[in-house]
Amino acid sequence: MLNAGDTAWVLASAALVMLMTPGLAFFYGGMVRAKSVLNMLMMNFICLAIVSVLWVLYGFGESFSSDAFGGLIGNFGNAGFANTWGHLAGLATAATDTAPAVPWPGSDAIPVLVFAMFQLMFAVITPALISGSIADRAKFWGWALFVVIWVTIVYFPVAHWVFSFDGYMGADAVGGWIANKLKAFDFAGGTAVHINAGAAGLALAIVLGKRKGWPKDTGRPHNVPFVLLGAALLWFGWYGFNAGSALSAGDLAGVAFTNTTVATASAVLGWLLVEQLKFGKPTTLGAASGAVAGLVAITPACGFVTPLGSIVIGVIAGALCALAISLKYRFGFDDSLDVVGVHLVGGLVGTLLIGFFATNGVNSAGGNGLFYGGGWSQLGKQATAAFAVMGYSFVLSLIIGYVIKLAGGFRVSTEDEVSGIDEAQHAESAYDFGGTAIGHGASTPPPAPVSSKDGAALEGSKA
C-alpha cells in the first residue's frame, strides 16, 4: 500500500535535485568570462525546459518501461506518462497488491508519477553538466539541438541500463542490463549521470576545438563568489540526489545522507592539499571544485559503503580530480570548466572504488567489495559498467557533435567569441558597465538632481 512518508521524501528530494541545475548554472557561470556568463546560465537553464517536455513525451517510457531489446531500451509503454497517475511503483502489480516486487530501490510503494518526476531531475542535470566543457564558444540553439538528440539516444537508454530494475514498475517489468544482468552497483548515478556527462564533455571539447588564445589565455573566472554559491547549492541539492535515491525515508537514506556529507568534506581537504603542495596556496575555486568532485565520487557509492569508506573515497577523489584537470593541457583538448577532470574522473573513481569498499552490512541488497571479503568480482562488474557507459556516450556524442558542427550550427564565429558571446547570442549583457540597460534599448534614467543641502550632506558623509 501507499507509503505517505516515503512519497513526501521523494517529492522533496525531487525539488532538491531540481535546485541543482540552477546551482550548477551559478557554479559554471562564475567560472566563465563576464561577457559569456549569460550564455552559460542559459545553456543550463534550457535543459529544464527541453528535457522536461521530452521526458513526458517519451523519455520516461524509453527509460523505465519494460525492456524491449535485451536490457538496452524500454518499450515506450509509459510514453506520454501513460499508466502513471493512479499507479504505484515498488509493488508487484497494482495499488491493491501489498507484496513488494523488489527489496530495493524501494521496499514500499510510492506513486509512479512521483518516481517519474524524481527521475526527471536526473535527466535534466545530466546534459547541463556537459555544457561546462564548451563554455565561451557554443551557439545557443546548436547546444539546444544537441540536448534534444543526446538525451534521446544517449541518456534515456543509459538510464534504462542503470536505473530500471526488474519488477519495480510491475511484476512483469524487465529492466536494464547493468542493473539486472551485470549487477553493477550505482546507487544514484555515477555511471548514468557523471561518467555519461564527462565522456560527452570530452567528445564536445574535441568537436568544437580550442577557444581563441587557449591555452595561453585560459580565461580567468569573473565571479568566484558565484562559484562558491553554486557549489553550496549543489551540495545542498545533492542530498536529494543521493539520499532521495533510497526512495524511502529510512536507514538507507540516512546512510546515503551521511556518506554524502563526509565524502564531500574530505574531498575538499584532498583537493586543497594538492593545491598547497603544487602551488603553495589553497584557493576558493579549489575548495568549490573539490566539493563537487567529492559529491560526484560518492554518488554511486553512497548507499553501499560505510562513513569511513566515504572519507577515503572523498580524499582520493579530491586529490585525483585536482591532478586530473591538468590532463587537458597535456593532451590538448580545451575542456573549459573541467567537466572531464571532475565528472568523468570523479565518476570513475567512485564507481570503481565500490569494488573495494562495498559492504552488505550497509545495504543487504548490495554485496561485499575486495576489502570486505568479496574478492575481485564486484570490481570487474563496476569496471564493465563504467567503461561501457563511457564508450557509448563518447562515440555517440562525437557523432552528434560533428553532425551539428558540419551543419554550421555549433560554434560561434571568432568575432563573436572575442567581442562577447552574450551579446552575439542573446542580445544582452549580464552587467551594465555603461550606464544603460542593455538588450531592450531602454536608457537608465538620469539621477535626480541633488540640492545644495543634499550635496553638503553627501560631502560630509564622505569626510
Image: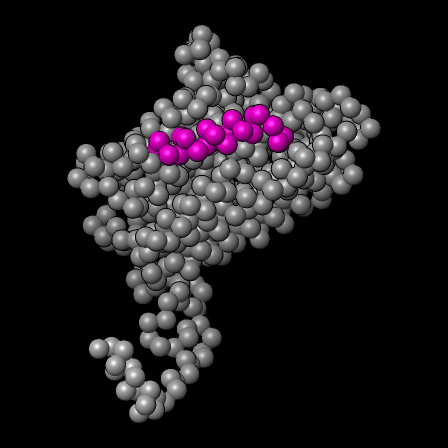
**What is the chief secondary structure element of the magenta stretch?**
helix
Where is residue 390 shown, x and y percent of the image?
A: 44, 30
Q: Is residue 85 visible?
A: yes
Q: Is residue 331 visible?
A: no
Where is residue 71 shown, x and y percent of the image?
A: 61, 25
Residue 49 shown left or right of residue 168 in the figure: left
Taking depth in this image into account, of 215 and 266 the one nearest to the observer is 266
**First to last magenta residue range:** 248-267
Question: As drawn, which residue projects farthest toward the right?
Answer: 96
Taking depth in this image into account, of 402 and 308 the one nearest to the observer is 308
Residue 396 shown left or right of residue 156 in the figure: left
**Compared to 257, does 460 lie above or below?**
below
Instruction: Determine the residue positioned at 58% across, 40% down.
Output: 13
Where is residue 69 shown, x and y percent of the image?
A: 64, 26
Q: Quadrant of residue 112?
A: top right
Does 256 lie within the magenta span? Answer: yes
Instruction: Determine the residue positioned at 50% across, 54% down.
Output: 45
**Compared to 235, does 420 lie above or below?**
below
Question: As drawn, which residue projects farthest toward the bottom?
Answer: 452
Taking depth in this image into account, of 138 and 99 the one nearest to the observer is 99
Taking depth in this image into account, of 275 and 66 the one nearest to the observer is 275
